[in-house]
């Protein structure tokens, strides 16, 4: 019976892969990181949850206005707390073609680090990536039923992150393609790009479509802080991500 179940899961997963690698982009879910009782990273009076929401809403508006054939769904549109598994579930329930997470970075040990990084689900390549993923995943502990919702997931276990990475491998190629386009547009806009990276973010693991996790900049860097804390800066970040989404959509639909 277990063998039959594995075969069924492989078949279902294979169908999802085909869906991910072909067809038009019709539905995009945008996830503003953190929210409510979870402020995310903070510096001075700036909070990650507020910046992420602002950039998310600006990005969604651009997509709706300039790509009218695309449906935009937000995991949150206000300052509310949303469990990671529910963020992913929203994307899965709506059969999203893309899942985009918007976040803000920080490094308390160095104010020199600056720029955007766009992550895809995968094995950790550096200790910094692992630390970032584990820090972001700690929000799980704020959820009322985290032991039930994430059965078997150990925040401190490297093996758990390997498991997460394997689950998303099917969507790696498309995720990397979109992530590369985001970083290219960030660089073209004048914002420093730190490139495409891999890390075991829980919210990406649980989604059944290509997904990216955009760290838009470092609140602990004075230059990035000015960008992240201003309306013009947030608009600039949203525009860069939008251009990448548009280019990705056009490349998919040429096939």
Image (cartoon, rainbow, N blue to C red):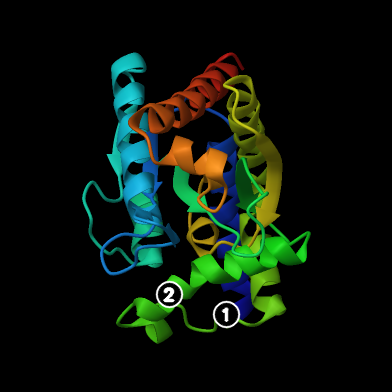
How far across and down, in percent of the image, does residue 159 sit?
71, 78
How far across and down, in percent of the image, does residue 209 sit?
51, 46
Q: Secondary structure at mark 1?
A: loop
Residue 107 versus residue 4: which sits nearer the camera? 107
Q: Is residue 30 left or right of residue 135?
A: left
Q: Which residue is mark 2?
A: 140
Is residue 6 visible in the rendered image? The answer is: yes
The part of the image, by quadrant, that contains residue 65 is top left
Q: Is residue 110 left or right of residue 46?
A: right
Q: Are marks 1 and 2 in contact (CB under 8 Å)?
A: yes
Q: Quadrant of the C terminus?
A: top right
Q: Is residue 63 left or right of residue 187?
A: left
Q: Secondary structure at mark 2?
A: helix
**Residue drawn at the location 34% of the way across and 55% of the way down:** 45
Q: Earlier in the sequence, mark 1 or mark 2?
A: 2
Q: Is residue 126 left or right of residue 240?
A: right
How far across and down, in percent of the image, does residue 8 sit?
56, 63
Q: Residues within 10 Å of mark 2 (few under 14, many from 20)?
A: some
Q: Residues within 10 Å of mark 1 (few under 14, many from 20)?
A: some
Disc number placed over residue 155 in the picture, else none: 1
Residue 132 versus residue 84: which sits nearer the camera? 132
């Amino acid at each position: 019976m277990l063998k039959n179940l594995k075969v069924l899961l492989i078949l279902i997963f294979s169908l999802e892969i085909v869906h991910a690698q072909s067809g038009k982009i019709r539905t995009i879910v945008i996830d503003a990181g953190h929210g409510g009782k979870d402020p995310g990273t903070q510096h001075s009076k700036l909070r990650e949850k507020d910046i992420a929401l602002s950039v998310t809403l600006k990005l969604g508006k651009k997509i709706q206005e300039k790509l009218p054939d695309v449906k935009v769904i937000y995991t949150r549109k206000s300052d509310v707390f949303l469990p990671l598994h529910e963020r992913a579930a929203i994307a899965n329930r709506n059969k999203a073609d893309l899942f985009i997470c918007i976040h803000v970075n920080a490094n308390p040990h160095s104010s020199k680090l600056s720029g955007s990084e766009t992550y895809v689900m995968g094995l950790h390549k550096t200790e910094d990536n692992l630390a970032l993923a584990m820090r972001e995943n700690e929000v799980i502990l704020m959820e009322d039923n985290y032991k039930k919702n994430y059965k078997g997931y150990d925040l401190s276990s490297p093996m758990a992150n390997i498991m997460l990475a394997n689950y998303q491998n099917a969507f790696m190629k498309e995720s990397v393609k979109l992530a590369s386009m985001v970083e290219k547009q960030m660089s073209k806009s004048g914002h420093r790009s730190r490139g495409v990276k891999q890390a075991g973010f829980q919210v990406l693991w649980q989604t059944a479509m290509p997904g990216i996790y955009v760290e838009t900049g470092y609140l602990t860097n004075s230059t990035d802080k000015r960008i992240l804390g201003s309306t013009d800066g947030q608009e600039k970040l949203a525009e860069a991500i939008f251009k990448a989404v548009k280019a990705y959509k056009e490349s998919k639909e040429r096939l």
